[in-house]
Image (cartoon, rainbow, N blue to C red):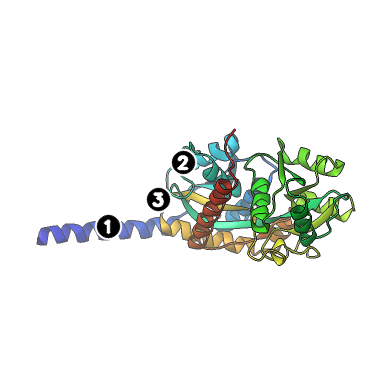
Amino acid sequence: MKLFRLIAFSTATAFATGHDVWSAAYPDRPIRMIVAFSAGGGSDLAARNVAQKMSETFGQSVIVDNRTGANGAIGAELTARAAADGYTLLMLSVAHVIAAAYESTLPYDVIRDFAAVSQVVQQPYLVVANLSLPARSIQELIALAKMKPGELNYGSSGIAGSNHLATELFSAAAGIRMVHVPYKGPQQALADVLGGQMQLMFTSIIVGLPLARSGKLRALAVTSARRTNAAPEYPTVAETLPGYESIGWYGVVAPRGTPRAAVELLSRTIANGLQSKDVKERLAADGSETVGNTPVEFEHFMQRELTRYAKVIKDAGIRRE
């Protein structure tokens, strides 16, 4: 028994000592941050701003590595299978969580296979309508949809896309029924809203805002829980439907099993970097607001998002074609 206790004590001491030494040295070589979507997109912009500040703080290069394909699954799987040593990260997005709620054959689990580090930014959608639609507010849109059930149509970037689910969540909360018309991308859908073939759309604020402010489309509301700094003149959907929220977002994760000391150091570093004026301004130009929360907060947020979108998909009867 004494021998067993001695071995156990020695093992625990060696682990703790090694962990402390490892933590003190980290990072001592470049970190790779995988982006699962194309260069120039929202996740790429968020990653490059975060990577720059991390590099400045650590004195080590943080290299952004775009690994596109399969709607983000290729980059996510690459991260999930990487060594859990703190040197491989992923800029996760709402699209990954939606895919987990929608797909049944993903080669990874979006919650179990990743260690949450920090949410980076969030972006509301902007509810825009063709000028011919006789609704100038969310209240009027709901009243019109109830008066004409199944007659209003809305476009989206595709089945189970984030703006499709944002609209379905809205319809469920409002108790209305509208016709969904999926497109192969947001640009085509928005073009038809502009042309009058489509009546409305939940679109990214960075794209929809200039069209609304120039008078080409009518903006009814934003989908964040509170008014956004990017367009404070527009009310939130939640001002009419309390509790409604649907946002785009990006956040950093690492492979599950990454040492807690590394995860917490990364989280603090990212949160501090997001407070800098230059980063805030660059991300605000894309319609984003910085977040920077703890690993526990971000993991709980991801779980809530997964649960919510799984329910929306089930309740709306959305299935793979």
Q: Which residue is mark 3?
A: 257
Q: Which mark is residue 220?
A: none
If the image is split into quadrants, where does the N terminus sit? bottom left
Where is residue 36 drawn, in percent x and y?
59, 41
Q: Earlier in the sequence, mark 3 or mark 2?
A: 2
Badge 2 density bin: few <14, some 14–19, many ≥20, Cα 10 Å:
some
Residue identified by numbered label 2: 108
Between residue 251 and residue 89, name the one nearer to us.
251
Depth check, mark 1 against mark 3: the one in front is: 3
Q: Element at badge 2? A: loop
Identify the amino acid type marked 2.
Tyr
Q: Place residue 236 in its image quadrant.
A: bottom right
**Is residue 30 at all visible to an observer of this figure?**
no
Q: Earlier in the sequence, mark 1 or mark 3?
A: 1
Give above or below for 235 relative to 208: below
Residue 52 x/y as whole percent: 63, 53
Question: Where does label 1 land, which residue?
Answer: 14
**Which residue is pictured at 70% across the width and 60% down the height?**
280
- Front-most of residues 268 and 156: 156
Front residue of 194 and 231: 194
- The residue depicted at 32 percent of the width and 60 percent of the height is 17
- How far across and how far down the image is residue 180, in percent? 70, 42
- Crowdedness near tag 3: few (<14), some (14–19) or many (≥20) residues, C-alpha within 10 Å: some
